Image: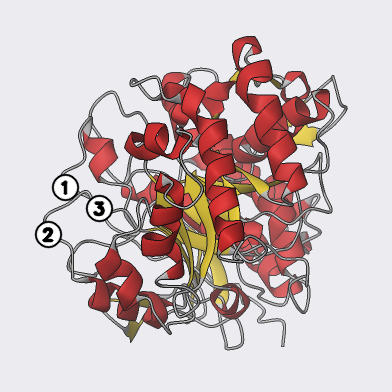
Amino acid sequence: MAFFYLLLLSSIALSDAAGWVGVNYGRIADDLPPPEKVVKLLKDQGIDRIKLYDTDSAVLTALANSNISVVVALPNELLSSAAAAAAADSSFTDNWVQSSISHFYPSTKIDAIAVGNEVFVDPNNTTKFLIPAMKNVYTSLQKYNLHNSIKISSPIALTALASSFPTSSGSFKQDLIEPVIKPMLAFLRQTQSYLMVNAYPFFAYASNSDKISLDYALFRDNPGVLDSGNGLKYSSLFEAQIDAVFAAMSALKYDDVKVVVTETGWPSKGDEKDVGASGENAASYNGNLVKRVLTGRGTPLRPNDSLNVFLFALFNENRKPGPTSERNYGLFYPNQQRVYDIPLTRADVESGSPTMVNGGSKAQVPSSKGQTWCVANGKTAAEKLQAGLDYACGEGGADCRPIQPGSTCYNPNSVEAHASYAFNSYYQKMARASGTCDFGGAAYVVSQPPQYGKCEFPTGN
């Protein structure tokens, strides 16, 4: 996956069809900054879309006039009340919309309402309330003339699928189709809304690390997976998961309904059973996903539909139950320092720079516009360096003649030295575009000329 989107990123400008990236702002913690400081952090970072899990008045008030688009939520515990029939002038949803939506709108840019969250796996058995609740909320929005401005949907987990591999076999669980999936998709079509999907390649990888390549899960260079059912080749687990949802929708004749990924992420820390949970992997997954989304290309099954995602989550949340990983999905610590540096905006991707860190100071990294070189990471396994070397000199089109036997840069004769030359040749050929010095984590950018014997590394200028 990595090399495919790196080639896309080398174009002069990113596609106008690029998707957008938002962030989930969860608050199951007792050490988070007040909403006013959070809004400042969001604006400093260039994050202009967030998703909440409620309609907390302090948060919605802080977001007023910030120009940050917001998805709010009607929590699962309110679904039964929202679904209940009531007098038209005193229904639960009328009161809820008045106090939680219209009271703040339009000063607070509420774009959508998530009615419930992963309702199908709610242990309180709230599935039967979902469709009536969605319809009642919509009816109440109509009374306030907000139904054309605010979308309604409900996030589903991938566990709603009976099959997701191979991707082309994607299908919803049979017991959900008639009672809730079809009515929900019909409602979304009628109201011109979209299906909200929570997708976590981390869970699939952690449960099947003996079968799923980590590079495939992290959008890094890998051989890919061919789906014999649809003839498409997948280079990332994320895309395969989303296309499995599309396949399931297509089987029910709802190809026209759009999808927004309302949760996806990777934990930076975990327990022994949280295979793959680390800061390095979290940075790779989220950083590569952001670059991937902002290139403007859809999935293999729907290449013309831009990908839109909300990363999970803004902060590490210390009160979340469950394994350690659940408390370590944040992009930021509660003190507003970054857990790791990744691009979050189109400008970051175009400039090749990470976003703000440490409460507002810009991370200093070599710019693709200056004198920079690409070198191999000597700590990377020799096999991985060799794979990157083979790609750069082969499909990548790097000029590797100087490292052939008897040529000027053959010595020192080591994989690291040869890989560095090849990586740099590819990097300079791609005009030092953001992301073209990565090779699955086997390379990095330096601002001083590499020293390997008497070999001179070109700059491409």
* Label annotation for residue 135: none
**For this rendering, which residue is in front, 10 or 329?**
329
Q: Amino acid at mark 3?
A: Asn
Local secondary structure at mark 1: loop
Distance (Cα) linking label 2 and label 3? 10 Å
Residue under numbered circle 2: 31
Quarter occupied by the C terminus: bottom right
For the residues carrying marks 2 and 3, which lies nearer the camera in this image?
2
Residue at the (79%, 34%) spot, across then down = 233
Work out which residue is located at the far right of the displayed protein and give it. Answer: 231
Local secondary structure at mark 2: loop
> Would you place residue 385 above or below residue 170 in this image?
below
Closer to the chain start, of discs 2 and 3, is 2
> Would you place residue 445 above or below residue 255 in this image?
below
Q: Amino acid at mark 2?
A: Asp
Local secondary structure at mark 3: loop
How many neighbours does mark 1 have within 10 angstroms: few (below 14), some (14-19), or many (20 or more)?
A: some
> Would you place residue 429 above or below residue 234 in this image?
below
In the image, 242: left or right of 30? right
Closer to the chain start, of discs 1 and 2, is 2
Distance (Cα) linking label 3 and label 1? 6 Å
Residue at the (42%, 82%) spot, across then down = 66
**For this rendering, which residue is in front, 208 or 251?**
251
* Label annotation for residue 316: 3
Residue at the (28%, 72%) spot, across then down = 38
**For this rendering, which residue is in front, 274 or 242?**
242
Q: Amino acid at mark 1?
A: Asn
Where residue 128 sits: x, y (%)? 50, 22
> Would you place residue 220 above or below residue 72 in this image?
above
How many neighbours does mark 2 have within 10 angstroms: few (below 14), some (14-19), or many (20 or more)?
A: some
Residues at marks 3 and 1 touching, judged by CB atoms closer than 8 Å:
yes
Where residue 108 sits: x, y (%)? 44, 75
